Amino acid sequence: MNGNDKVIKTNFWRNLLIFASILGPGIVTGSVDNDAGGITTYSVAGAIYGYKLLWTLLPSFVILAVVQEMNARMGVVTGKGLADLIRENFGVKITFFIFLGLVVADIGNTATEFAGVAGSMAIFGLSKYISVPLAAIAVWILVVKGNYKISERIFLFFSVCLLSYIISAVLAKPDWHQVAQGLTRPTMNFSRPYIGMVLGIIGTTIAPWMQFYMQSAVLEKGLKIGEYRFVIWDVIIGCTATVVVAFFIIIACAATLNANGIVINEAKDAAVSLKPFAGIFASQLFAFGLFVASIFSATILPLATAFYVCEAFGFEAGINKKLNEAPQFYILFTSIIAISVGIILWPDAPLITITIWSQVLNAMLLPVVLISMILMVNNKRLMGNYTNNVFQNIVGWTTTIVLIALTVILAISPLISALFKRS
C-alpha cells in the first residue's frame, strides 16, 4: 500500500467516524414522521384508493428533503432554533398566533400516538387502561431522567424497527405492475375525500412540528458548518426512510384490504384485517410497527412542542437541562402528555376524527411555517453565503402555493357541491 492509498483509507475511516457521530437528527426526524397518525393515514389511503395515491410520495420526498435541509442549514449557520428565529424576525404577536394553532394540532397528534399504543397493544390482548398509562410513564422517564445521547440512541433503534413494514408488504404479495403504475401515473380528482386524503398524506409526511424538532436537534448535537456535508447525508437517509416506510404501508393495505373490499377506520383495523390475507406474522409485524412508531412519536411530538414554545418565548429548553434548570420546558412537556392521555382514556372519544383531521391541520399550517422559513433562509443578514439556491426556492414556494390551493379547495368543496345540487 503506497502513501496515497494510506491517506485515502485514513480519510475514509475518519469521515465514517465523523458521520457516525453526527448521525441522528435527520434520521430521527424523518423516521418519527411515520407515527400512528401517519400509519393510519397511509393505511386508510391504501385501503380506500389502492395503489392510486403512491405517486404523492415522490413529490413528498423531494419537498421533505429540501425543507429538512433548509432547517438543518439554518440551525448550523445561525446557532438558533426555528422558533427563536421566527420570534426575532416576525415579532411576538405573529409568533403567538402561529404557535397557538401548532400547539392545538400537536396535542391532537400526541393523542393519536397514544391511540396507536392502545390499538397495537389491544391486538396482543392488553387493555388501553394499562398500556397507555404505562407508555406515558415510560416516555416521561426517558425524557426527564435521560439525556440527549441516550435518547437519540433509543430513537435510532426505533427507526430501524419501523422497517418491519417492508416485510408486511412483501408477505401481502402485491401486484408490482399496479404498484409501478400508481407510482408513475398520477391520478387526481377534486372530490372532498380525495383532496382531504392528499392533504393528509402531505401533512403527515411533512409535518410542521418536524421543522422545529429538526433544528432543535441540530442545536442539541452542537453541529458546526464544517460538518455540514455529513448533516446533508443524515437528512437524505432520514427522508428516504420516511418515504420507504410510507410506501410499503400503502402497498400492504392496497394488496390486501383494497383488493378484498375491506373498510378500515384506523391502523389497528389494518393490522387485524391483514391476518386472513397475509398471515398472522404479517398482522403482528404491522401491530409491532404501530406500537414502536406510537411510542417513538409520543416522545418526540410533545418534546418538539415544548422545545419550540420555550424557544419562542425565551425559556430554557433541552433534554440535557435538569428539571430545575428548565421548569417551563418540562411542565409543558408533561402537560401535553397528560392532556393527550386523558383524551385517549375518555370513553367514546372520536379518535378517528382526531387522527385524520390533525394530519389535515398539519397540512393547513405547513404553508405558514414554510413562508417563515423561506423568507429567513434567504436573508443574507442571517445566512451570509448559505442562502437558498434557485431550485430550493422553487420547491419551497411551489409547495406553499399548492398546499394553500388544496386547502382552499377542501374548504369550499361543500359549497360547490351544494351549488351544483341546487342547479
Image: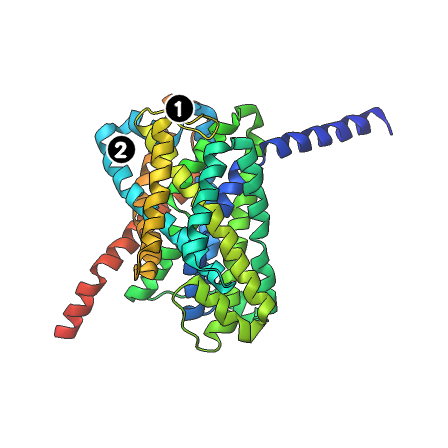
Q: Identify the residue position indicated by label 2 in the image.
A: 95
Other-residue count near label 1 (Cα within 10 Å), few / some / many at <14 / 14–19 / ≥20:
few
Q: Mark 1 or mark 2: name the one nearer the start of the chain.
A: 2
Residue at (51% x, 59% y) in the render: 247
Q: Residue 107, position in %: x, y?
A: 33, 46
Residue at (81% x, 29% y) in the render: 5
Q: Is residue 423 visible?
A: no
**Mark 1 or mark 2, which is nearer to you?**
1
Front residue of 328 and 385: 328
CB atoms at circles 1 and 2 under 8 Å apart? no
Q: CA distance from mark 1 to mark 2?
A: 26 Å
Q: Identify the residue position indicated by label 1 in the image.
A: 324
- Tag 1's secondary structure? loop
Three-letter code for the amino acid on which mark 2 is drawn: Thr
Residue at (48% x, 43% y) in the render: 138
Furthest residue toward right? 1
Left or right relative to 418: residue 145: right
Left or right relative to 388: residue 279: right
Q: For the C terminus, give its image quadrant.
A: bottom left
Q: Is residue 146 visible?
A: yes
- Tag 2's secondary structure? helix
Three-letter code for the amino acid on which mark 1 is drawn: Asn
Q: Residue 172, position in %: x, y?
A: 57, 70
Left or right relative to 90: residue 243: right
